[in-house]
Image (cartoon, rainbow, N blue to C red):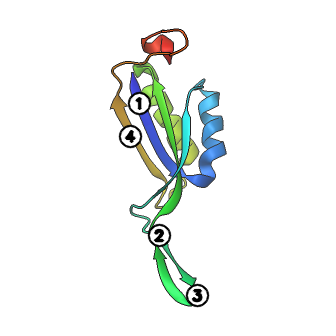
Amino acid sequence: MKRITAIVRAEKLEVLKDALFAIDVRGMTIVQVQGCGNQHGWKEYVRGTEVLLNTIPKVQFDLVVADAQVDRVIEAICAAARTGEVGDGKIFVAPVEEVVRIRTGERGVEAV
């Protein structure tokens, strides 16, 4: 099993949820986050003083999927979240040793 963490533009929330539902990914955790990277933020004026806002609102999706689903999920995320501009986001993939469903005690892929 793998944990896929995708950090994408906030406006891609609904589009990405729909894309994941379309490929039968049901379990996901979605968190609104702030971050900085190559996009660098923007300047605003607060009480006449220029302020550099270097963190940008993003949405983080966390999913745990079977190894066989990883490529399909990554392709769906890229297709839904890509604009071609700086700031489209990143996808991180990490191994998951164990998953346990608290209610039933199921373990492994069955618990996902």
Work out which quarter of the rendered image holds the N terminus and state it. top left
Residue 42 versus residue 79 in the image, above or below: below
Q: Earlier in the sequence, mark 1 or mark 3?
A: 1
**Residue sitting nearer the eye, 22 or 26:** 26
Asked if labels 2 and 4 touch by Cβ distance under 8 angstroms, the answer is: no
Marks 3 and 2 sit apart, C-alpha to C-alpha, by 19 Å
Which secondary structure, mark 2? loop
Q: Residues within 10 Å of mark 1 (few under 14, many from 20)?
A: some
Which amino acid type corresponds to the residue marked 3 in the rendered image? Arg
Q: Residues within 10 Å of mark 3 (few under 14, many from 20)?
A: few
Label 2 sits on residue: 41
Asked if labels 3 and 1 touch by Cβ distance under 8 angstroms, the answer is: no
- Mark number, residue 3: 1
Q: Earlier in the sequence, mark 1 or mark 4?
A: 1
**Is residue 40 rendered to the left or right of residue 97?**
right
Q: Identify the residue at horizontal 50%, vertical 62% (top origin).
A: 56
Asked if labels 1 and 2 touch by Cβ distance under 8 angstroms, the answer is: no
Which secondary structure, mark 1? strand
Residue 77 versus residue 27 in the image, above or below: below
Label 3 sits on residue: 47
Which secondary structure, mark 4? strand
Of badges 1 and 3, the one in the foreground is 3
Marks 2 and 1 sit apart, C-alpha to C-alpha, by 28 Å
Q: Earlier in the sequence, mark 2 or mark 1?
A: 1
Label 4 sits on residue: 92
